[in-house]
C-alpha cells in the first residue's frame, strides 16, 4: 500500500525516527538493582497508601500500597526483599513523593498467585482482577485501566482500539513486544473484548513496523480483529488522532473517547492484562527503550518497576559525560528528569540521554506569522494565538479558543522557525484554566 493510501489524521509532522539503534534488538531482562524505589504514585489519580512498614519482609507481587479511591490503583513489590524505607524520594515528576524502598534479597520469591481462566470469569471479575493487579495505561499515560473499562451505562462502547503505533522517535519497546509476545497481547485483547462486548476491534500500527503488522495479521486471521497499517506520522499514537484515523470518528472538544463509543488500550497494557488475569501476576515490570546519543549500547530492557534510572544506564554501557538532557519517555512528549536517581515506573516507556551538542539550541526570535504551528497542530488549535493570550493573562479567551484540547504533543514548538516555546505556553494555559475552574 502506498503511504498516501494509509489511514491517518490531519496535521502532525515527521521527525527523524531514530529507532534503528534498538528496533532490531530483542528484549533483555534487567538484573535486579541494589534497591528498588517504588513511588506510591505511578498512575494518574490518587496515590496509593502504604500498607507495609520499615523492616518488613515482602514477597514479589505482594501489595505494598493500597488504592485510595476509584481513580487509583494498588502498588506491588516488584521483587522479594526487605522494606528499608517508607519516605519521600525523588519521583520522575521531579518532586519528592512518598515511596517504598526495597532492598532485594535476590531470590525473586513470588507471593501466592491465583491464576485463572478468563473464560470462566465474568466481566466484573475480570475488571476487579485488572484493578487489583494495578494495571495502568503503559503507553505513558498511566490512566488506571479499570476506570477506562467501566464506562457509564449511557456511554455504550462498540469499538476497541489497540494502540501499537509507537510514533515517538527512538522508542521501540512496543515494537519488540509485538514481535516477541504477540500471543500474550492477543490473550489480553480477548479479555478486553469479553469485558467490553465490542462489535469491532482494531490494532493500529505505524507502517514502519511491517514485521509486527505481518505477524499480528497472521495471528489475528479469523478472529474478527483487524490489524491496520497507519501512515508514519507523529503523533499518530495520540488517542484522539488514532481514533480519527481508524474510525473516522472525531472525539468532541473536551470529551473522552467513550463519547464516540471507543476504548483505546496500548498493546503493552493488553499484555499486562493477560499476565494479570491468566497468571495472577500484578504489574511489577515492563519493557522500555534505553537509548539516545549518549547511551553506548542502546537496548530494550524488561526492568523491575522502581529500578533507578542510573542502573538502566549502567546496563547499557554507562556514559562518559554527564547528560545535558534526560528524558523518561520519548523526545516529543517525554518527561525531563532532574537526576538518574529517579526510578523507572509503570509508565516509563523509555529513557533517553542527550549531550549538549545533540540539543538544538536556536535563539528565540519574534513570530514571523508563517502559520506552521497552526498547520501541524493535530488538535486544530491556534497555538500562537493561545500563547499570546497567556502572555496577556487572557485566560477566558484561551479557554474559548479550546486550549484544553491541547494534547501537548509539541508539534507546534518543533516546527516553529522562531524557536518559540509554544507547548510550554499551552501547558501554562491549561494549568491556569484548571486553576480558574477550581476556584469558580
Ligand atoms: S497546541 Fe498542543 S496539540 Fe497543538 S501542536 Fe501544540 S502541543 Fe500539539
Ligand atoms: S510557527 Fe512560530 S513563527 Fe510561525 S506562526 Fe507559529 S509561532 Fe509564529
Image: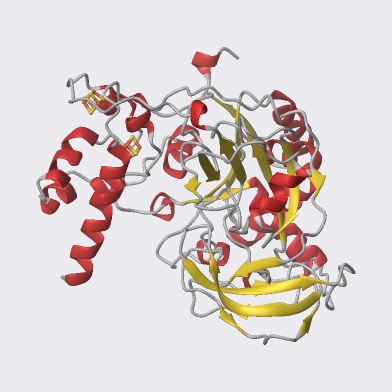
Single out the residue that lies furthest toward the top.
2
Rendered position, 375 above or below 164: above
Closest to the observer: 121 or 49? 49
- Which color scheme is applied? secondary structure
Residue 414 picture location, percent across and down:
37, 28
Single out the residue that lies furthest toward the right.
107
Is residue 395 at all visible to an observer of this figure? yes
Closest to the observer: 224 or 10? 10
Rendered position, 235 above or below 86: above
Quadrant of the frame with the N terminus:
top right
Q: In the visual, does 316 lie left or right of 107?
A: left
Is residue 186 at all visible to an observer of this figure? no
Q: Quadrant of residue 11?
A: top left
Q: In the visual, does 185 lie left or right of 237?
A: right
Residue 289 picture location, percent across and down:
67, 41
Closest to the observer: 208 or 19? 19
Residue 312 picture location, percent across and down:
71, 48
Task: Give the residue at x 57% y 12%.
Answer: 2
Rendered position, 422 above or below 315: above
Residue 305 picture location, percent across and down:
68, 61
Q: Quadrant of residue 317?
A: top right
Task: Give the residue at x 12% y 53%.
Answer: 396
Q: Quadrant of ligand 1?
A: top left
Task: Give the residue at x 69% y 27%.
Answer: 21
Amino acid at each position: 500500500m502506498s503511504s498516501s493510501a494509509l489511514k491517518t489524521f490531519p496535521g502532525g509532522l515527521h521527525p527523524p525516527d531514530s529507532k534503528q539503534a534498538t528496533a532490531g534488538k530483542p528484549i533483555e531482562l534487567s538484573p535486579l538493582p541494589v534497591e528498588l524505589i517504588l513511588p506510591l504514585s505511578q498512575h494518574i489519580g490518587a496515590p496509593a497508601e502504604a500498607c507495609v512498614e520499615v523492616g518488613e519482609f515482602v514477597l514479589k507481587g505482594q501489595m505494598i500500597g493500597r488504592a485510595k479511591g476509584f481513580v487509583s490503583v494498588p502498588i506491588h513489590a516488584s521483587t522479594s526483599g526487605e522494606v528499608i524505607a517508607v519516605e519521600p524520594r525523588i519521583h520522575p515528576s521531579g518532586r519528592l513523593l512518598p515511596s517504598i524502598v526495597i532492598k532485594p534479597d535476590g531470590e525473586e520469591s513470588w507471593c501466592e498467585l491465583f491464576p485463572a481462566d478468563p473464560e470462566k470469569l465474568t466481566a466484573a471479575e475480570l475488571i476487579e482482577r485488572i484493578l487489583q493487579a494495578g494495571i495502568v495505561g503503559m503507553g505513558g499515560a498511566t490512566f488506571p485501566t479499570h476506570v477506562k473499562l467501566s464506562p457509564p451505562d449511557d456511554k455504550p462502547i462498540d469499538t476497541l482500539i489497540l494502540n501499537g503505533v509507537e510514533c515517538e522517535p527512538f522508542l521501540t519497546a512496543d515494537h519488540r513486544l509485538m514481535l516477541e509476545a504477540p500471543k500474550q497481547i492477543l490473550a489480553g485483547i480477548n479479555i478486553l473484548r469479553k469485558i467490553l462486548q465490542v462489535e469491532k476491534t482494531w490494532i493500529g500500527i505505524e507502517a514502519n513496523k511491517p514485521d509486527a503488522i505481518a505477524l499480528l495479521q497472521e495471528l489475528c486471521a479469523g478472529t474478527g480483529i483487524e490489524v491496520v497499517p497507519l501512515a508514519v506520522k507523529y503523533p499518530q499514537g495520540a488517542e484522539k488522532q488514532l481514533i480519527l484515523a481508524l474510525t473516522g470518528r472525531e472525539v468532541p472538544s473536551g470529551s473522552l473517547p467513550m463519547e464516540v463509543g471507543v476504548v483505546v488500550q496500548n498493546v503493552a497494557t493488553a499484555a499486562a492484562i493477560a499476565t494479570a488475569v491468566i497468571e495472577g501476576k500484578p504489574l511489577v515490570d515492563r519493557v522500555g527503550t534505553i537509548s539516545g546519543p549518549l547511551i553506548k549500547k542502546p537496548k530494550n530492557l524488561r526492568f523491575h518497576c522502581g529500578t533507578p534510572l542510573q542502573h538502566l544506564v549502567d546496563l547499557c554501557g554507562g556514559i562518559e559525560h554527564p547528560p545535558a538532557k534526560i528524558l523518561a519517555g520519548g523526545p516529543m512528549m517525554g518527561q525531563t528528569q532532574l537526576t538518574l536517581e529517579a526510578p523507572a515506573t509503570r509508565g516509563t516507556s523509555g529513557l533517553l540521554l542527550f549531550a549538549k551538542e545533540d540539543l538544538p539550541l536556536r535563539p528565540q526570535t519574534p513570530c514571523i506569522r508563517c502559520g506552521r504551528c497552526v498547520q501541524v497542530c493535530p488538535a486544530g488549535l491556534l497555538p500562537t494565538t493561545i500563547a499570546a493570550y497567556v502572555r496577556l493573562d487572557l485566560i477566558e479567551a484561551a479557554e474559548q479558543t479550546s486550549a484544553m484540547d491541547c494534547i501537548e504533543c509539541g508539534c507546534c514548538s518543533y516546527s516553529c522557525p522562531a524557536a518559540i516555546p509554544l507547548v510550554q505556553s499551552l501547558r501554562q494555559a491549561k494549568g491556569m484554566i484548571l486553576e480558574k475552574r477550581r476556584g469558580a
